[in-house]
Image (tube, grey):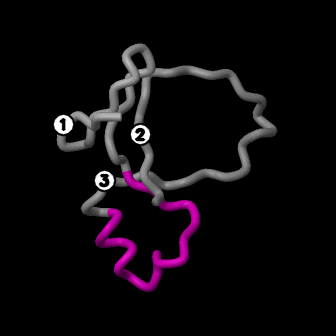
Amino acid sequence: QNALYQSCHEDENDVQTISHKCQVVGREHYEQMTRSKKYQDRQDLYYLAGTYDPTTGRLVTAEGVPILC
């Protein structure tokens, strides 16, 4: 939950589709932040879980470990 994967995939979207900004941090920082009462209920906080290559369909964790799908 709240994990995001970065990708080189590009899309064009209307500006009206943007509802709000969010914050993306590393997993360790995310875990530290969510232990704090200040951040526990935030719906706009995510962590970078890894990368996705749309040409190969390959997922790799932030630590460099391939994920088999």
Mark 3 or mark 2, whichever is nearer to me = 2
Residue 66: percent from left, percent from top: 23, 34
Picture quadrant of residue 53: top left
Asked if residue 37 is positioned above or below residue 59 in the image, the reply reads below
Q: Residue at x 77, y 29 (%)?
A: 14
- Name the residue at the top extreme: 55
Residue 39 left/right relative to 60: right
* Residue located beneath label 2 in the image: 5
Q: Amino acid at mark 2?
A: Tyr
Q: CA distance from mark 3 to mark 1?
A: 14 Å
Q: Which stretch did the figure color magenta? A: 30-47
Mark number displayed over residue 26: 3
- Mark 2 and mark 1 lie on one chain; the one further toward the N terminus is 2
* Disc 1 residue crowd, few under 14, some 14–19, many 20+, Cα 10 Å: few
Asked if residue 13 is positioned above or below residue 17 in the image, the reply reads above
- Name the residue at the right extreme: 16
Mark 3 or mark 1, whichever is nearer to me = 1
Mark number displayed over residue 64: 1
SS state under label 3: loop
Q: Amino acid at mark 3?
A: Gly
SS state under label 1: loop
- Name the residue at the front extreme: 69
SS state under label 2: strand
Residue 61 left/right relative to 21: left
- Mark 3 and mark 1 lie on one chain; the one further toward the N terminus is 3
